[in-house]
Image (cartoon, rainbow, N blue to C red):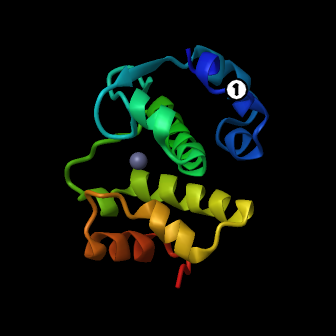
Amino acid sequence: MFTDYFKGFEKVEAVKGIFAEKTEETLHKLKIEFIWFGYMGVDNTDGHLLVNSRYLRNGDKTDIYLDVVHELCHVKQWIDGRELFDSRYEYVDRPTEIEAYRYTVQEAKRLGLNNERILLYLKTDWMSEEDLNRLVRNMQIDLK
Ligand SMILES: [Zn+2]
């Protein structure tokens, strides 16, 4: 269960901002599955969280926190019946991704991360510089 591994998230304002009065209920029902590749994701069949256990052990704690916020946005989108993997869009143009990234970047700013650090967080190893710029443009948040 999510709450066995991620403690106190039901008290986090950014998480309450996603699920509102359903925060505790949703987190207590949320399952996680450990995977052996990538970082984190949401399973499209029943909306559970996928977490790379090695990333969880060795990853940067701030990055992991922001990833959890990002993925919980997707959990909410899944609950709302939205299409998480809409192949009509490329990753950095997909409305569900832009929304999750936008929310997460706002939380990163609230934590006091500077623009350089936020861009470092956003630039994953499989994202080109051009994709990153497009994502930032799509989010309409000034990170320069
Ligand atoms: Zn995402």
Residue 47 image point, x, y percent:
43, 25
Quarter residue 133 falls in: bottom left
Quarter residue 42 falls in: top left
71 versus 119 height, above or below: above
Residue 36 image point, x, y percent:
30, 28
At a point 66% along the width and 57% down the height, the residue shown is: 107
Number of disc labels? 1
Which residue carries the number 1 mark? 7
- Mark 1 near ligand 1 (CB under 8 Å)? no
Q: Amino acid at mark 1?
A: Lys
At a point 27% along the width and 76% down the height, the residue shown is: 130
- Give the residue at the far front of this rendering: 58
42 versus 4 height, above or below: below
Q: Is residue 32 left or right of residue 25?
A: left
Residue 91 image point, x, y percent:
28, 56
140 versus 27 height, above or below: below
Quarter residue 141 falls in: bottom right
Image quadrant occupied by the N terminus: top right
- Give the residue at the far left of this rendering: 88
Residue 114 image point, x, y percent:
63, 73
Residue 27 can be seen, yes or no: yes
Q: Is residue 108 left or right of residue 49?
A: right
Determine whether the residue tagged by mark 1 lies in a helix, strand or loop.
loop
